[in-house]
Image: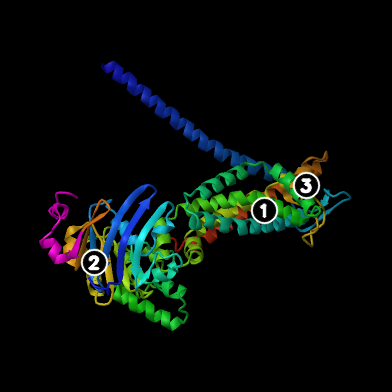
Amino acid sequence: MNGSAPISIRDLSVFYGDLQVLKHINLDIPAKRITVIIGPSGCGKTTLLKSLNRLLDTTEGVRVQGEVVLDGENIYAPRTEVTRIRKKMGLLSQKPQVLPMSIYENVAYGPKIHGLKSRQDLDRQVEHYLKVAGLWDEVKDRLREPASGLSVGQQQRLCLARGLAVEPEIILGDEPTSALDPQSSQNVERRLIELKQEYTVVVVTHILRQARRVADYLAFLYLGELVEHGPAAEVFANPRDPRTRAYLTGEIS
Amino acid sequence: MNGVANGHLGKRKRADVFFRVLATASAAVVLLSLILILGTILWKSVPALSLSMLTQTPKGGFYLGKEGGILNAILGSLYLAVGATVLAFLLSLPLALYLNLYKGRASKTAVWTRFFLDVLWGVPSIVYGAFGFVIMLALGLRVSLLAGMLTVALLEFPIMCRAIDEVMRLVPLELKEASDSLGATRFETAFKVMVRQCAPGILTGVLLAFGRGIGDAASVLFTAGFTDRIPTSLADPAATLPLAIFFQLGTPFPEVQQRAYASAAVLTLIILLISLAARAMSRKVTRHVVR
């Protein structure tokens, strides 16, 4: 990787109390690619993902060491404005979490808090990002209805539209399809593949087949350690570390 | 072998029947007490109930009034409870948000604050009355609507705050993260997401506290006083329904005692109306709640 990596993780360690869940991670995440972080549950995948937009430090008892450099700036530097960092990333969580407001307001929430006021602009943004997320046709006639009335698959696409509407550079997905049925999962995967034209995507998954389908770059995490990383095709074909090989063949899970 | 099994089964069945009877009886006691309370109050108040009860201040020589009405106490109670509830709300909502968003919900601060609130909840209202009295004197206030409001606000605060806090604790952490990850400030997450998600619970908490405030006699005894006039400023003393009941019931005159029951009926009616209004409102505020 060269210096153009939008996110560069340097010697990152995370502690929950006395327990070290991430151990000296070094990883450059390539721009406009889908980077997939795989590993057995409890290996620190979600922690790594959440450390990228500083969602972790809101949790009591969490200590972060090391650096995450985003656009040349260490986001853990003392005076960093957290809201500005987060605006650069959209997050898809395991279970889609819609906000307690209408479908329209869910998408307009981000642009509104970041200062967009004009009704017309908001309407345009909402329509645009609902289309990008592939949800517009299903909801265009009921934008004012509560978002909680949508199906889980629709809610996840709404969350995607909501995340995109703040115009981030990076999309983070924390097992974004784990609560969805196969068809909705496929739908979300397809969106992610389309989106890498314009965005840098980082996805955590424990589904190997999903990783094979979407990954350009692969990182394998085991017990808090970054065991192996590299272009997905290479790692899948020729894992160098015996632990990676064992995980890919299903010996450890 | 068989006998033992049968005996065992019989014992289990008896336990089952016994508990079912106990549970049914408990339900019946709850229902009956409510009916009896309402029935007694209404029955005893019938002779005194009239439109003038609701629209006039006491007349007839002494401030309890054999004639006229209890408008002084109705308005006094409403002013006082509304004022106190607003004050308590201004403390409760920020504190509940602070515990759940600004501090971790399981943080030491939150755990200890909850403990203090629970202790305050359990403090008898006469103690609040005495405390309010001391504060009132220290502030150079006299027995007045304002002093009553402050005291009742103190009484309502732990109830309202804990009720709101309990609903906020149930909000999934992911909802907060969803708002945070869009670059929202804590303030935005608090008021645009938390408050909306918890709106029904907040409403319930406010009403619970209001009901407790409007029905309390001991806390206003030394602080709001009693008068047959309608208060026109915060510095005036104010009559309240619970104290009206207390004083009227304490007289040796049956006519005045009947008026005590009428006052009780009015107080109950106010609380009933507010509960109904809240029910109607809650349908609106629950519309967008995420489950």
- Range covered by the magenta-colored residues: A228-253
Q: Position of residue B41 (x, y in %)?
A: 68, 43
A89 displayed left or right of B191? left
Q: Which mark is residue A35?
A: 2
Q: Nearer the viewer, residue A11 or A200?
A: A11
A22 displayed left or right of B26? left
In magenta stretch: residue B192: no
Q: Which mark is residue B71?
A: none
Picture layout, residue B170 above or below residue A80: above
The chosen color scheme is rainbow
Q: Are marks 3 and 1 on the same chain?
A: yes
Q: Which residue is mark 1?
A: B153
Q: Position of residue B240 (x, y in %)?
A: 74, 51
Q: Secondary structure at mark 2?
A: strand
Q: Which residue is mark 3?
A: B222
In which quadrant is the C terminus of chain B drawn?
bottom left
Density class for disc 1 (Cα within 10 Å; few <14, some 14-19, many ≥20) is many
In magenta stretch: residue A236: yes
Q: What's the amino acid at mark 2?
A: Thr
Q: What's the amino acid at mark 1?
A: Ala
The answer for which chain carries disc 1 is B
Q: Secondary structure at mark 1?
A: helix
Which sits earlier in the primary sequence, circle 3 or circle 1?
1
